[in-house]
Image (cartoon, rainbow, N blue to C red):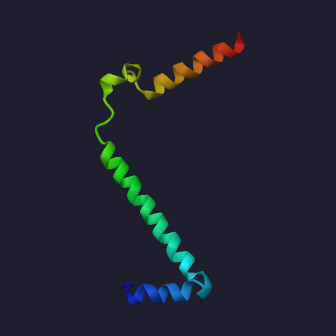
Amino acid sequence: MIPDDLLNDLKQLVGMRQQSRFVAEAIRKELQREKMKNALKNSFGAWKDEDHPELKDGVDHYVRSQRKSTRLDRTT
C-alpha cells in the first residue's frame, strides 16, 4: 500500500495520465541503485595491490607514463 501523503503528492505534481509512467520510472531508478549497491558490496576485496605493481607509484604516475608513451608513438 502506498502511503496517503505520497499519493497526494503524486496527484498534485504529476498529471493523471503520467502517474503510472512516473511510478515505474521511480521504481526502475531505485532498483538500479540497489543493483549497483549490491555489485559494490559483492566486489569488495576483489582488488589486490600486489596484482597491480604498475600502480605502486600511484594512478596519476601510471596514467602520465601511459600518455607520455603514446605521445612518443604519435610523433615517430
Query: Compared to 27, does 61 lie above or below?
Result: above
Q: Nearer the viewer, residue 57 or 23?
A: 23
**Image spot of residue 42 (x, y percent):** 31, 46
Q: Considering the image in quadrants, where does the C terminus appear?
A: top right
Q: Residue at x 60, y 81 (%)?
A: 18
Query: Compared to 12, does 53 lie above or below?
Result: above
| Residue most extreme to the top | 76
Q: Quadrant of residue 33?
A: bottom left
Give the left or right position of residue 44, taking residue 76 as reference.
left
**How many numbered circles does the render carry?**
0
**Image spot of residue 64 (x, y percent):** 53, 23
Give the left or right position of residue 5, taking residue 18 as reference.
left
Q: Considering the image in quadrants, where does the N terminus appear?
A: bottom left
| Residue most extreme to the right | 75
Query: Compared to 54, does 48 lie above or below?
Result: below
**Image spot of residue 53 (x, y percent):** 36, 19
Q: Residue at x 57, y 83 (%)?
A: 14
